[in-house]
Amino acid sequence: MSKNLVIVESPSKSKTIEKYLGNDYKVVSSKGHIRDLATTGKFGLGVDIENHFKPNYINIPGKGKVITELKKDVKNSDKVYLASDPDREGEAISWHLYDALGLKDSDYDRVVFNEITKNAVLDAFKHTRKIDMKMVNSQEARRILDRIIGFRLSKLMQSKTGGKSAGRVQSVALKLIVDKEREIENFVVEDYYEIDAFFKDFEAKLEKYKDQDIELKTLEEADEVLSKLSKAFNLESIDTKKKNRKSKAPFITSSMQQEASSKLNFGASKTMRIAQKLYEGVDLSNETVGLITYMRTDSIRLADEFVNSTFHYIEENYGKDYIGYPKQSKKKENVQDAHEAIRPTSIYRTPDSVKEFLTPDEYKLYRLIYYRALASLMKDAKVEQTTVILDNNDYKFKATGQVLIYDGYLKVYQEYESNEDKILPPFDKYHTKVIVAESIEKSEHHTKPPARYTEAKLIKEMEELGIGRPSTYAKIVETLVSRNYVDVVDKKFIPTEIGFEITDKLQEFFSNIINVKYTANMEDGLDKIADGDLVWYKLIQDFYDEFEPLVEDAFDKMEKKAPKETGENCPECGSPLVIRKGKYGEFTACSNYPNCKYIKQEPKEIKEFIDCPICEGKIVEKKTRKGKIFYGCNNYPKCNYALWDKPTGHYCPQCNGILVEKGKKIKCVNCDFEKEK
């Protein structure tokens, strides 16, 4: 019997959604992208440069079987629903499925849902549409731009520097880190002094002399001021104001990554991995349900249904006076407002009610997301801020304090906020306007250089500058670290020597392209494509016409980095030996190549793992001609026993076979024994 076929991206979502839809639907997974650009054509870009950059797509290696199975499912179905993620990348995946599976417009519908709950999924199937080609064109233009820049600049860097790659957004992010480091290097530390008056109940800091700000740069200046002060201060003014502490907007991708970093100590990649699991679905006692909405978004909008239910929840649990109002986005550009903010799928699904079904890290992130969304719909907190000015021989000292008079959203979000309360005494207790200090003291301080970027601060900066997209931030950070362009010390990014080199070379030849403004403008152009206001290939053509001549000039004129000398001389010709990079890593060779082709043979460290089960040899680590690691007998070619999986060095307790590492499990090569690592 034919069924309706639903294709999603993730296997973990398919079972959940199939339960919601019932027996008339079969839900399968494409397991992410099924196609990508080929590496054929000019420069291996996989596009036809002379024909409006027409892309040449090929199946991703290993996806052939998936596509074959999907074609069978399509053939046996009456209707196909393409249900990839609700963003530009998801739209592009749906289009690739449409094209690769040979679908016709009458065969399919596109369905999107922002949360994986029964009501949301069933409602989405009542409001289907066709693929939005404007969104597809925007995403594919991004992919082609990144391919052109990545391939061309990466090849340039590999041939001229010690770097491995460069990229449209990656290299701008690296430049931010390098520029910050140079600010720190050029910073000149200056000494200065402060003078504080200490009273029984409070303290005050010297701010002005008469009406002028005062700076004390030397010890002599500080001592001179001290010599003119007495312990008697005149109470000049008391100013009390009531101020609001505004509740925070619900999370978007970048703010979630930032808060998870600072409050939970999660890296951006870890945060996104956990959020993906919370979105795709968690097995609760009697249902499988997505706990949060889609986690790749830059919109703070909340659905009316969620707002109304949350207002009801707030009134039930905290009182009507705590009900606030939805936040409005301050910026229109770069916001895919069809999305919602990241929020719980139900405000009644409290963190404590689902805690037993979550890992500790899942619980921590869900709790943060839950209370951020709840707090965003509660009233602002109110504080009473008091400023006191004290006069001492025309030297003005200031004391400030604030008292929380209404907790508002802090009722639920206090633990995630810094405590700014600093209470001043009631000054009406002083019967005169003269207050006597217990002591007046000077203290030495030093100006500090700007702080290095943490992961959270770099993501915030990129988001504010409008470079990259929410879904790319974690990958960019991961690439900078893995390429050895930055070191992470005390959670702060410090550019390496190669990081400086890459940035300087790119700025020497590509300063008009590898910069914040150009990259942000490119994001605007991609948004215009998504809105239908710009033809995708015209954006790429304009870029390419400017970019390619710069690349050719750089290949011609960029000075190649000299290989590093080892301090040894070649035993064959006497020239210095140098470290070179080859296909399989670094090696030591003669600097007089190609006249001298001497290569130093390094002694190989052989890793022995376990006895060979066939002969008396040992299983050791080896490499294929293409550099892939495998594990084989050291008596080869007499014995050709080999494994692809790494032996643990232990034997199976059931059959005494070799145990190997297989993902997160330990498995026997001979029987069905397995266990968690």
Image (spheres, rainbow, N blue to C red):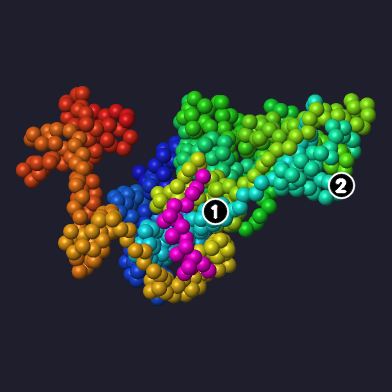
The residue closer to the viewer here, 508 or 630, is 508
Kind of residue at disc 2: Lys
Q: Residue furthest right?
A: 432
Is the residue marked by circle 1 packed among few (<14), some (14-19), or many (20+) residues within 10 Å? Answer: few
Kind of residue at disc 1: Glu
| Residue placed under numbered mark 2 in the picture | 210
- The prevailing secondary structure element of the residues shown in magenta is helix
Considering the numbered disc 2 on the image, is that residue within a helix, a strand or a loop? loop
Q: Residue furthest left?
A: 638
Q: Let me know if residue 511 is in the magenta part.
A: yes
The residue that appears at 19% across and 24% down in the rendered structure is 654
Q: Which stretch is magenta?
A: 492-512
Considering the numbered disc 1 on the image, is that residue within a helix, a strand or a loop? helix
Quarter holding the N terminus? Answer: top left
Is the residue marked by circle 2 packed among few (<14), some (14-19), or many (20+) residues within 10 Å? Answer: few
Q: Quadrant of residue 588?
A: bottom left
Query: Where residue 108 appears, x then y in whole percent?
Result: 44, 54
- Residue 209 visible to an observer of this rendering: yes
The residue closer to the viewer here, 404 or 105, is 404
| Residue placed under numbered mark 1 in the picture | 185
Q: Quadrant of residue 551?
A: bottom left
The residue closer to the viewer here, 554 or 599, is 599
Query: Where residue 139 appears, x then y in whole percent?
Result: 48, 59
Question: As drawn, is 319 to the left or to the right of 115?
Answer: right
Question: As drawn, is 506 to the left or to the right of 445?
Answer: left
